[in-house]
Image: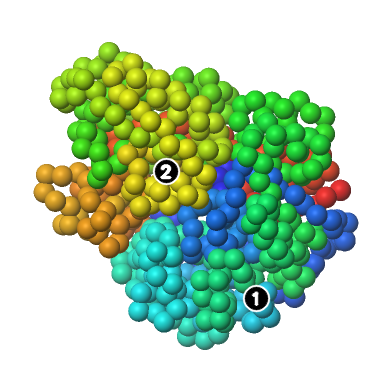
Amino acid sequence: MASRDNATNRRSFLKAAGGAAAAAALAGCLGGDGNKNDGSGDGDGDGNSGGTLTYARGDKSGSLDFQNTTSGEAAKVTNQIYNTLIAFKPGKTSLTEGLATNWNVDGKTVTLDLRKNVKFHNGEKFTASDFVATYRRFVDESYEHYPGKSYASSYGPYTLGVIDNVKAPSDHKLKITMSKKYAPILPNLAMFVSAVHSEKAIKDKGKDLKSDPVGTGPFKLKKWDKSNNRVRLEKNSDYWGEGPHVDEVVFTVVGNNTSRAQTLISGDAQIIDGLGAQSSQQVEKSGDTKLVSDAGINVGYMAFNMSKVEAFRKKKVRKAISHAIDTKGIVDTIFKGIAKQASQPIPNSVMGYNDSLSPYEHNPEKAKKLLKEAGYADGFSFELATFKNPRTYNPSPIQAANTVKSNLKKVGIDVTIKQQAFDPFLSYTDSYKHDACFLGWMTDNADPDNFYYALLHPGVSIDKVPSGQDWVDPSKHDNINTLDAAAWANTEYMKLVEDAQATYDEATRKEKYKKAGKIAHDEAPWVFMDHAKDLRGVHKNVSGFELAPISGPFLRLVKIN
């Protein structure tokens, strides 16, 4: 879900997503990753593999329904089971064919030609009506099979909310009509949450899809052993594309970084992720394994819940805390060698990065001065919620949380750390129970909108933000964007990112995002922490694996030698 290819591919991708002429030219031009399969399936091709591939990670999946989660851990599994209309090329940020073979963007209309002879795991043929049902299940509350707001994730309104309607002129044609011009529409259709459910499965299974998924992907669910945090997938012999080359994929959980590295070295796993500095060195030094790394398109941060903690509503308090926390020390000492300091929501590989911004310097005296000016000379206290297990953007969350606690103690602020496993942690923050929290983001589509709107726009209209206030009360809004964990609602910022969404001119979008980055930096709704490398440990008996900048992991291409 987050590593990088070369800069040329990134620029080409972003140009295609942002330029009107390029968007019009996308019809029939982005498809093709060397796979000319007509839908008949090619099994494991040369037959030189087979066997079971074990993928060890730091945490579990909470759901196997992509419409019921915002978790990257869930996406790692659902990406093996499901397909999207448009896909990302393995190891790239550019687009290619998925379940659609051609597409065209014309103003507010997207048309797509769909692949024929594709079957779902339940034997049903894939047609346009499956995507219509999938779309309605995610965002249409009037749809008979809409699972409810507490089930459907906030990704729905963000990813597909701009769509007015989806129609199926025929079994293999789709017409999507949007409410406005929307630059990120094609990469959004390639995101893991834009995959396609079987209409029959939607009707037959309902919410049971979270544990009994039915897709068109290279693997299908064999068994989910929740008590042991193990998901076992088996090869889909009817898969329409290249691969899979192994008979089974098993996702396991090994919570400790060092233990996970040892699992790889011993051969009990073939691929691992969630590596920290020490475990990366273990993998690199072993003769039986190799460390695969690349710059990641991600961000790690600490969000201030302005809707709950009154002190956080004062910009000077937020800036004081940003100066008090030694983010450079965290990056250099705890995340040593695998991350760099952040100054804004996006890393420098994403269009609109503002080179004029610098990370907040560690300056406790300045922090004390700002706290005094804000009326908090004697400090205050708050709870910092954090996940326990490593994430790409925060490979050592407990150590980082303890550093934050220590740093803030020196300026008179008392911090209580609340540790949780990842899924209950996400539920906790989605419901705004946190005071402040560690969070992070691995891009879904490499478009700046996937950071700026997804993470820092509250999802409400500008006229619903109370005058003179830069935050909203989530309990008073039905469609709050829960990814905005700060509940931040700066109307100048909101207008910039909304305008950037609605233009296809790349140069204009770029300038708007630079301005949005400066506002975010100066207003400090987050403590900007880091942008981390993407790291994977791979056993020497594995071939065909490469880091996926977006989507993935592409385990259908992996062989065990």
Residue 357, label in figure: none
Marks 1 and 2, Cα distance to the nearest angstrom? 37 Å
User: Is residue 64 rendered to the left or right of residue 502?
Assistant: right
Secondary structure type for disc 1: loop
Using a 10 Å C-alpha cutoff, classify the residue at mark 2 as few (fewer than 14 neighbours), some (14 to 19) or many (20 or more): many
Outermost bottom residue:
170
Using a 10 Å C-alpha cutoff, classify the residue at mark 1 as few (fewer than 14 neighbours), some (14 to 19) or many (20 or more): many
Task: Tell which tag, 1 or 2, sits nearer the viewer.
Answer: 1
Residue at numbered disc 2 = 351
Residue at numbered disc 1 = 120
Does residue 162 show up?
yes
User: Is residue 509 rendered to the left or right of residue 85?
Assistant: left
Outermost front residue:
227
Q: Count up the numbered dots.
A: 2
Give whichever of 504, 542 is nearer the camera. 542
Residue at figure coordinates x 50%, y 50% from the top left:
423
Q: Amino acid at mark 1?
A: Phe
Give whichever of 411, 285 is nearer the camera. 411
Give whichever of 23, 331 is nearer the camera. 331
| Residue 479, picture quadrant | bottom left
Question: x, y percentage for residue 134?
Answer: 49, 74
User: Is residue 328 rendered to the left or right of residue 306?
Assistant: right
Secondary structure type for disc 2: loop
On screen, 271 above or below 130?
Answer: above
Residue at figure coordinates x 17%, y 52% from the top left:
465
